[in-house]
Amino acid sequence: MKKSNGKIVHQQLEECAEKTGEPRQIVCDCGAAEFRMKHDAPGTYDMKHKGAAVLKQELNGDADWLEFVGGASKSGKRVRQTELSYMASQNQRSKARYMNAGELVRRGSDVVCGLDLEKAEKGEDIEKIEMYAKFGWICEFHDDLKDWRSLVEIVDGANAFVDFVGLYRGMHEDLDDYLSELQASLRFRRIKDELVEFELEQQEKIGEDETIFQFVFGRFGTIEAYMR
């Protein structure tokens, strides 16, 4: 689908309903309101978009994060056609940019780790190497990256768990146990409780013996692109 908007999505959902019958449950990102109202089907909000909303809520007002993102973009452009291009993070999406915030954080952490190893080997001479000249600024975000990585691991962990087990009554307790095993920083420990509470709210919209799977979100698109 080359173009996507509310009207086009509504049309495609109607075409699906004609083929498969009335929907029993709609997993969405709070869109398709007209379709949900017309078909009077219970709707649940998917964890993938909830996670992105949490990341935006926590990072959008963080001046250090915005500076880091800007620096990563500039460094990426400088090394794009060089032997250091492998160190650059992927360009952030113009839409849903917080859905790939994790990749940016992990790449930044890897760069800091690599520079630490180089510094241990070369000492003060590290300032003479090209990698440090292009990416040395990231070391200033060493502590921030630890905190951001903790946040990303909570959100990614919740996404992976829900993708694997689905949504069912009592799942929030299992999710709580799973996320409690992660080493969350004090700054973001409350995010775990927010995501668990979110899943509890979604459970109330499904039947006692039902399990709702959301893992097809984004994956069918990948499969479709691969099969072309």
Image (cartoon, grey):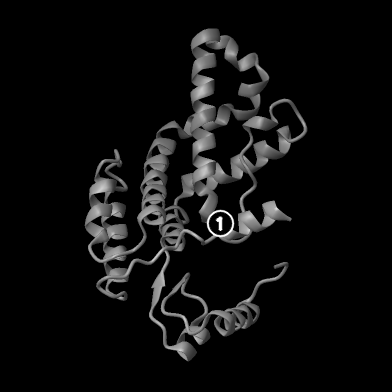
Q: Position of residue 207 (x, y in %)?
A: 28, 75
In this rendering, would 213 be left or right of 84? left
With respect to residue 83, does 119 lie above or below? above
Residue at the (77%, 33%) spot, across then down? 81
Q: Secondary structure at mark 1?
A: helix
Q: Could you tell me how many numbered marks the image carries?
A: 1
In this rendering, would 227 be left or right of 175? right
Residue at the (55%, 59%) spot, across then down? 218
- Looking at the image, the residue that sits furthest to the front is 20
The N terminus lies in quadrant: bottom right
With respect to residue 69, does 222 lie above or below? below
Relative depth, front residue between 21 and 110: 21
- Looking at the image, the residue that sits furthest to the bottom is 38
Q: Position of residue 226 (x, y in %)?
A: 68, 51
Residue that mark 1 sits on:
219
| Three-letter amino acid code at the position of disc 1 | Arg
Relative depth, front residue between 157 and 169: 169
Residue at the (69%, 27%) spot, across then down? 84
In this rendering, would 194 be left or right of 76? left
**Crowdedness of circle 1 by 10 Å Cα count: few (<14), some, many (20+)?**
few
Q: Position of residue 123 (x, y in %)?
A: 52, 9
The C terminus lies in quadrant: bottom right
In this rendering, would 58 be left or right of 9? left
Q: Position of residue 151 (x, y in %)?
A: 38, 46
Residue at the (65%, 28%) spot, across then down? 134
With respect to residue 137, does 48 lie above or below? below
